[in-house]
Amino acid sequence: QVHLVESGGGLVQAGGSLRLSCAASGRTFSSLAMGWFRQAPGKEREFVSAISWSGTSTYYTDSVKGRFTIYRDNPKKTVYLQMNSLKPEDTAVYYCAAANSPYGPAVPSTDFGSWGQGTQVTVSS
């Protein structure tokens, strides 16, 4: 298990930017694929993005491609989600997650087993 703490959420106007951070504890962070998910009110949690353990491979859901960037700093045990050109439909609680198994793929079907508490992102129109 990896302990994850998200930060960086807030209220922003449409077209603005936010950077989410997810700080991890545990020795295995650098070997785990990491993901970002979000859940809007009344909707199911959805995959947003993932990054491989090495940072060389990334995956984005179609709705955020070209606007969001995921990256990681393994020595700092932190994964980030840079969100630009935000839209009201991006409003949600954003969660980071760590894969259960090391050196696995970073895709929506990855078995993510450790989750943070979430951070609220609200985009006003």
Image (cartoon, rainbow, N blue to C red):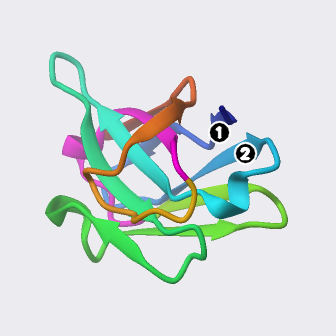
Task: Please state the extent of the stretch shown in magenta in the rendering.
Answer: 83-101
Residues at circles 2 and 1 in contact by the CB criterion of under 8 Å: yes
Q: Residue at x 62, y 57 (%)?
A: 79
Task: Identify the image quadrant of the C terminus.
Answer: top left
Displayed quadrant of residue 42: top left
Residue 125 appears in view: no
Amino acid type at mark 1? Ser
Q: Looking at the image, which is closer to me, 100 or 120?
A: 100
Report which residue position mark 2 lands on: 23
Q: Residue at the spot x=25%, y=27% of the render?
A: 40
Residue 7 marker: 1
Q: Tell which tag, 2 or 1, sits nearer the viewer.
A: 2
Residues 81 and 32: in front is 32
Image quadrant in which the N terminus is located: top right
Q: Quadrant of residue 44?
A: top left
Position of 51 relative to 55 (above/below) = above
